[in-house]
Structures are given as C-alpha cells and as structure tokens.
Image (cartoon, rainbow, N blue to C red):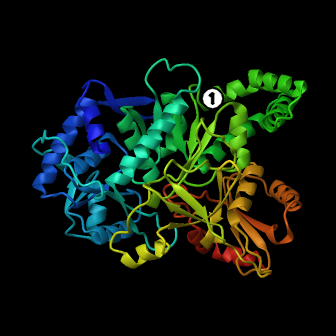
Amino acid sequence: MSFIATIFGHLGHDPETPALHEVFGERVETTTRQRLTSLIARFRGRLRKAKVKPGDRVVLLAPNSARWVAADLAILAEGGVVVPMYARQDPKELVAMMHDCEPTAVIVADAVLAASVRKGWAEAPILTFEELAKGDPVQEPPLSRDPSEPVTLIYTSGSTGEPKGVVTTQENVDYMLPQTATAIGRMMALGPELDGPEVVFHYLPFCFAGSRIVLWTCLYRAVALHVSTDLDNLATEIGAVKPHYFLNVPVLLERIKNKVEEGLAGRPKPIRWLVQEGMEAFDRKQAGTATLRDRIHYRMADRLVFRAIRKKVGPRLRCLICGSAPLGEDTQRWFQALGIPVYQVYGLTETTAIVTMDTPAGRVVPGRVGPALPGVEVRITDDEELQIKGPNVFPRYWNKAEVTTTAFTDDGWFRTGDRGEVDDHGNYRIIGRLKNLLVPSSGHNVAPEPIEQLLTENIPGVEVAVLVGHGRPFLSAILSGPTDEAMVREIIDRLNQDLPHYKRVRRFHLASEPFTADNGLLTANQKVRRDAVEAHFADIIAGLYP
C-alpha cells in the first residue's frame, strides 16, 4: 500500500480524533480528521475544475497551516505533483521557479501572496485557499499512480547557484516513511509509557524536504502534529504544547544552550561549580572513567540543577532531533548531560531528506550523524566526498538533464558534495561542503565548518560564525550574536593555541545585526548563505586584511 493510501486510510477512521493542531501562542486550535477530510474533498473538487490532471504540477505557496496540509493531500489524491515553495522567498525567485515547473495551478494562502506573484507573472493560474474551499466535494479514494512517478518537486534553497527542482517519487517516500516511523517508535519507547497521545511540535516550513517528511511521518503514523504559526514566538508555543520531541536546526539548539548558560552565569558560585563538576563527571562517565566521586557529583548536579533546566526546556521531552546541518559535538554532549538525548539526521533534498540517522538502538556519538539507513549505501571517495546509492535517492532534476548527469558518477552513485568520515562503528561525521573549502595564500585546504562550530560552541552569545579568507594571508571570522569583543578575542586566542597555524582565526568582526532569512543571510531552514554574507560584509572583510 502506498504512503498516500495509508494516510487516507487513517483519516477515514475515528472522525473526531485530532488530525492536526495549529499553535497560536498559548492557544491551540485542533483540526479533526473529519474536518481535514472535508477540506481535502472540497479542495479536490476545485482542483478538478481547474483541470488539474495526474502528473500536473501544482505550486503550493503558503505558511504552515491545516489548509496547507489539506492542499498537499488534495493534490496528491488527484495524482498531481506538489511543488511547495517558501512563502517569504523573494517573489522574483518564486516566479522563476514557477515558470520552470510550468504548473497547472498556483495555490496561495491569500490575496497578498497572490498579488506578489502576479507582479512577476500576471497570468499565473492562481487559486487562494478561500477559492479552493468552494469546490464541489470529491469523496473518491486517492487516484493511484505508478510508484516511479513523482509526488513532489522541491526546489533546492539556492544558497549558492540557481535553484534546481528535485524530483521525489512515490517509491522514494514509500521507502522513507517506514524508516522514520520505526525510528520515532524507538525514541518514544524510551522511559515510561506515555500517559496520553504522542505530542509532536514542528516549526520549520513544510516546503523543505525534512519538514515534509516530519509531516508525512506523523500522518503515516496517525499522530496529530502541533504546527507553529509564529516563528518569533517559539518559546511560548513550545511551552504551551510541551512536546515529547521536535525537529531542530543547530542554530536553535545553540540559542537554547546560550540562554541557559547565560542564566547560570548569574547563579551563586557553588551552583556554577556544581554544574561544571556535573558536566565533567558526565564526560568521564561516557568515557568509562567515572569515579565514585564523579557519580555523586553528577547525581547532585542532576537533582539540584539539571532537572530544573529540563523542566524549563521541555518538561515532557523524550528527545530532540536535529538536522539541516551538523550539530557540534560539545552542544550535543551538553544536552545529553542534562538528560535530553539529541539524535542527529543527515541528508539532502535529493535523498528524500535522510541518509543517516541516530537512533536509541544504535551507538549515538556526539558530533556524528549516525549510521546509514537500512538499504542505503554510502561510500567515501579519495577526496572525502560522501556518495550515496539506495531507494531514497532521487531520479533526476526537473528539466535539467545535463545537471542530473553531472550529479551522478558513471557507476550510478549520487555525489552529495559533502565531505565526511566514518568510524569503526559505522557512524558518519560531516566535515563540510567540498565547495566551501577555503584555500588561504599558504595553500592549505581548510574546511570552515569545524572551525565555525568551535567558535559558536565556545564563545557565549555567538549564534552564527562564518569563516572567510580564501586567497588571503590568514583566516578571519564574521560573528553574529550578543557578545563582548574583549571576551571574544580572549577565547579565540585560547582556541588558536590548539589549531595549526593555517587554521587560526587572526581577526574577526562582530555583526550588529542578527543573521536571518529575512535579511538574506540565512536560508529559510537556517543555513548560512555564504555568498550573501561575503557580499553583505565585503567592505568589512576587505578591512580585516592589510
């Protein structure tokens, strides 16, 4: 049975059971299975009136909501190919992608988004959610399709270069959802039995591959997802929902860690000492060298401090999941010491979001992203590139035959463009992007990501670090976040002592503005847009060099 049929099968049972929750600050609005099914039926009717046929592309441009989910499922049920796009992306970029995929319909949340699209494409076949809801209900089962046919077309973020439409097939998703469902089941089995429904929170836009897999996994498992409606109010929303787990990006976990440590800095000296002793005792426990004194100190730290932090971060948290970019070893270990497991996943849009995954059944190693999924092959080339084969790998880029050919080796392996390594237990570590390598005038190849992680993990307040210095005599850093210049210099000088000369950060600039998707310095899923950062700070970077 296809994942689409499985999802619709769940929606057809127990009509008053929640299918989705929308979170508005401390208020939660629930959409039942019956309500969601009714929306889907009307949306399908309007899509038919718009002459959407199996295989047609339909753009979905809207913030996360119950109507977004209904539109996604309606398009799939009609045999269409969903093309989700980020509602806050530049309208010119959106229109260019729309022209590329040639949609039969463009679904937008409201008249404001419709107007922004029509400025660049006056004849766009737009339907708002309000118009979509006026369709004559279609009660038929979802139309079947060949497993090799596309279900979604997701454009890469375009952090560098031109966005490409990644074709994801039904068989890609049919493979992936049982993998994620099994992994989540294992995570939820940790600790005592749940005293109610499983509570999942999600804040990242559904238009990205990882978010889409979270959504589809919840629907596939018949678990009602709690959806954020305000990225600027996450703390309130998380506090209201009290989730058992949610997907994160490293930036958010770094912010949580920085905020907690900032609060601890104001506590009495004995508390700060106990926290330090507890963290060090945990490290020795993990290394197998803990003494009786370590065990006593950790229990004291846990009872007097760590439990209170866990309650504040999330009183019901069983675990956190982290993707989009590698999470630093120190940050992952810090959460583990508090008693909050963090499981990393690694993947790309081209691999149906996931290649490797930490699970409770495996050997979780801080700083590594777990082993490859069952049935997925990974090899590392002489230049350390990870290459992938398996049922998760996409078949092609949309309308880009030459680019597709280049993306695969002659023997059929997908080139990820990521540098990595693997330990004796099969756990992978992502070193960075091949194309991000910096080559200062010394001629050494420097991967910026490990040094950037070192800076964000060790300098209080720093949320984003971007290393620069390609073709320059030394490396410098652009740092974003509330911090102190003198302290930054002191910490960088200390870190430099353990780095070879060509990896040392000689100068830095503290950015006065945060890095966000709105100002173009981050992608919507919180990855650094390096080209944009270097362009934005071009004069400042030039001033860092004599």
Pinpoint residue 198: horizontal percent, then vertical percent.
45, 27
Q: Residue furthest top?
A: 195
Residue 42 vertical placement versus 496 (above, below)? above
Task: Indicate the quadrant containing the N terminus: top left, top right, bottom left or bottom right.
Answer: top left
Question: Which residue corresponds to the image point at 51% horizontal and 58% vertical from the top-left?
Answer: 517
| Residue at the image position 75 percent from the left and 80 percent from the top | 472
Q: Depth check: give the residue in front, 515 or 447.
A: 447
Q: Is residue 462 left or right of residue 393?
A: right
Image location of residue 115, percent across then percent down: 27, 61
**Considering depth in this image, is 26 or 154 the residue closer to the camera?**
154
Local secondary structure at mark 1: helix
Asked where in the image residue 52 lies, by quadrant, the reply is: bottom left
Q: Is residue 160 above or below residue 174?
A: below
Q: What is the crowding at mark 1: few (fewer than 14 residues within 10 Å), some, or many (at least 20)?
A: few
Instruction: Find residue 67 and report its horizontal and vertical position in percent.
Output: 28, 43
Instruction: Look at mark 1 in the image and give the residue it sits on.
Output: 312
Query: Mark 1: which amino acid?
Result: Lys
Name the one closer to the observer, 363 or 535. 363
Question: Can residue 6 be seen at all in this image of the molecule?
Answer: yes
- The x and y percentages for residue 544 are 76, 74
In the image, taking residue 396 as reference, residue 38 lies left or right, namely left
Residue drawn at x 36%, y 70% as measured from the top left: 92
Residue shown at 75%/48% (left/top)? 460
Q: How many marks?
A: 1
Residue closer to the observer: 495 or 55:
55
Q: Quadrant of the C terminus?
A: bottom right
On the question of residue 229 being in view, the answer is no
